[in-house]
Image: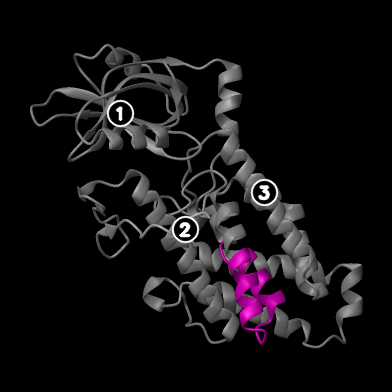
Amino acid sequence: MSLFTIPAIKRATQAQEGQGRVEARFHAQAEAVVEKQTRDGKPFWELTMADAEAKLVLRAWSDSPAFAFCAALAPGAFLEIEGEFAQHPAFGVEARRWSCRELETAEIEQLLGGPAELQEKQARDFLAITEALARIADPRLHALCQLFLDDFGDRFRRTAAARTYHHARRGGLVEHVAQMIRTAQAVGEIYPALNRDLLVAGVFFHDVGKLWENCPEPRGFGMPYDERGELIGHIALGIEMLNALWRKLLASEAAAAWATLSPSNEAVRNHLIHLIAAHHGEMEFGSPVFPKTPEAIALHYIDNLDAKLEMMAAAYQTGTPLASRIIERVRPLPANLVLPLEKYFPPLG
């Protein structure tokens, strides 16, 4: 039986459109193992399984061979799940007659690395980020970005951009930031009045607080909740982190040469902080201030654009069809989706 990823199972069952089941096996980590009861008081186990790209909920009923296995299972275990999968109209992908076993060490290492295609994409994205940061001319912003990578690079590379809505996977923040930087560079070409050094640095730092909100464990896919993230939130955490890095930077030997630069060190810091603070665009969405500079406006829309397009792409892959070419609404998108118009290619010859 072929080895699938969780997204591949979702796509395969979606393609069946209620016409049959998909026999498959996949490797994943048990992020949560919870004992529950039906309305009739019968016990069952609910497993939330996660791989490098997505999650899938399994249920082991009391008459299932997997029930006893789940009773002894601890969260964090790495498993192979084998069974039949199909789309349920209310619950999404549903597994029947499934069994499981714990993975061997080599299988765990391969799972943690993620699919080869995803590994390659995230490696390309991280390279694109570092190359863009290397081109920043302002020595303060350039040094600040490098200091962050030196101190937090490993954590940055495994952090997700969100828990559920977009790029909600290990390494998702790298994908999100890289695509935003590409867009920022294109926007900077069209609007040359923008401070591109500041905009690229703002893109890089805008979600760094998520290193404490959405960071998977070093050897796992689960995102444990962090008290700092809950009490403070990623925007305030990002500002706090930036100020701490800035103080460390100004204490370095290189900073002595920056005292006479224009714009001033303090102006650079304040404008970069504003980009972090204003990137949600509205106070009702968590920003303490509205965007008040061209770079802040640009950053807000670049962030929103990449998040929304990523959500739509995921919905097209795994969303529930309502009719031909129409997909049921996936929150927080505002309405049902329609498949995009195919590109036109002139006939050859």
Residue nearest the observer in this picture, 69 or 100: 100
Residue 272 at x, y percent in the picture:
65, 76
Q: Quadrant of residue 309?
A: bottom left
Residue 293 at x, y percent in the picture:
57, 86
Residue positioned 44% across, 19% down in the render = 2
Query: The magenta stretch spans which residues?
Result: 181-207
Q: Is residue 206 visible?
A: yes
Name which residue type carries label 1: Leu
* Disc with the residue nearer the chain's start (3 vs 1): 1
Residue nearest the observer in this picture, 53 or 18: 18
Residue assigned mark 1: 58
**Dots 3 and 2: beta carbons under 8 Å?**
no
**Dots 2 and 1: beta carbons under 8 Å?**
no
Residue assigned mark 3: 124
**Distance from the alpha carbon under mark 3 to that under mark 2:** 29 Å
> In screen coordinates, is 7 left or right of 197?
left
**Distance from the alpha carbon under mark 2 to that under mark 1:** 43 Å
Residue positioned 55% across, 74% down in the render = 299
- Pointer 3 local density, CA inside 10 Å: few below 14, some 14–19, many at least 20: some
